[in-house]
Image (cartoon, grey):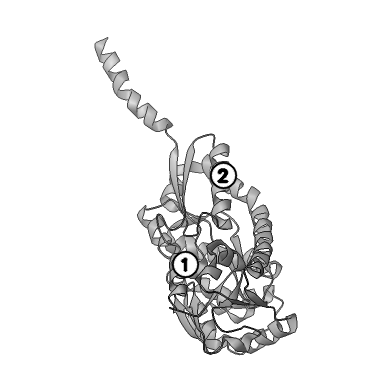
Amino acid sequence: MLGGVAASTLAAPAMLRAQEPLKMRLSLDTSATHTRTIQMTAFAKELEKLASGKIKVEVFHSAQLFRDRDVGKALRQGGAEMGVPGPWNLTGIEANLDITQSPSFYGRTAAEIYKAIDGEVGQALNGMIEKKLGVKVVGKWLDLGAAHTFSTNKPLNGPDDLKGLKIRTSGGAGQMLRVKFFDAVPNFTAWPDVPLALSQGTFDALFTTNESVKSAKLWDSGVKYSLQDYQFFAQYIPMISEAFWKKLGPDLQKVVTAAWASQIDGWRKAMAISQAESLEIMKKNNIKVGAPDAAVLNATRKRLMATQDAVVKELKLDPALVAKANAAFGIAGKS
């Protein structure tokens, strides 16, 4: 009798542990007020609800856990269970992610980008990431939006005004090449360090989005001018570590992917609205905005396309994948 009581007593902690929710740490390096952080916090709450308490999500923003450039390694090593980094942070692991910086992606609308990234090109990239990083990409990429050029002292009225600037990039060899194309000097500074670096004059221009300028109030750090030149369309890749994905099991895996799929289109629309609102907020904070028309953007892309073979070679992109992207954009050959 006593033996039975002892056995049941010993089993009780194990049963309690089995009922404890799986803890998922979601690492972001954007601020609490950034739309990505707001959307991922909402995702965490929705996922917990749909999982009926079987998953507990804790969102760490502002690089409290890791900067996006380090989150891939963190997922592999168990430092976090989920991250939503931009592809520019992962090009050192998978070079083909720099395809979004290739010439044909310049000056594109969101609808045009989706033709490539939501199609064969994105599917291929997801497979590469999963294999190289040991992660599961849980759905369509999350939008940040069009990245434009901003400066502290030099007025920006057209692409030629980028010449001579020291331009901060968010990472990746592709952005470095883009800066050099405009006869400017590339700089890399991690996003959490940008406001201080700007105010100290570490660089005098940067590629980023209206939303990011607004969320960080970069006008307080010296930004005075913007050229809405659609350098590239920034997105984030939602990924969960393979170890945690396996721990979830088939049923909870379906819950995660369904939760993401049910929200992604709404998030994209909300971000587009936020980007437009951010543009108006920038203007109210005395940032002077230049907006090249479609003819200027198309002419600039044509100039960039003349460098495509060299860019593909230097970035070590798969030519077949580049051809698929060009086809998605309706480009025949290289022009």
In percent of width and height, residue 218 lies at 53, 68
The mark tally for this picture is: 2
> What amino acid is labelled 1 in the image?
Trp
Quadrant position of the C terminus in the picture: bottom right
Please tell me which residue is depicted at 27% across the width and 9% down the height of the picture: 1
Residue linked to disc 1: 191
Please tell me which residue is depicted at 55% across the width and 51% down the height of the picture: 40
Q: Is residue 298 above or below residue 91?
A: below
In percent of width and height, residue 232 lies at 60, 74
The disc, 1 or 2, on the residue closer to the chain's N-terminal end is 1
Other-residue count near label 1 (Cα within 10 Å), few / some / many at <14 / 14–19 / ≥20:
many
> What amino acid is labelled 2 in the image?
Lys
Q: Is residue 329 above or below residue 67?
A: below
Looking at the rendered structure, the secondary structure element under dot 1 is helix
Can I make out residue 265 in this image? yes
Distance, label 1 to label 2, CA atoms, is 33 Å
Please tell me which residue is depicted at 45% across the width and 46% down the height of the picture: 24
In this image, 268 relative to 19: left or right?
A: right
Please tell me which residue is depicted at 46% across the width and 79% down the height of the picture: 203
Residue linked to disc 2: 254
Considering depth in this image, is 92 or 204 the residue closer to the camera?
204
In this image, 325 relative to 192: left or right?
A: right
In percent of width and height, residue 321 lies at 58, 74
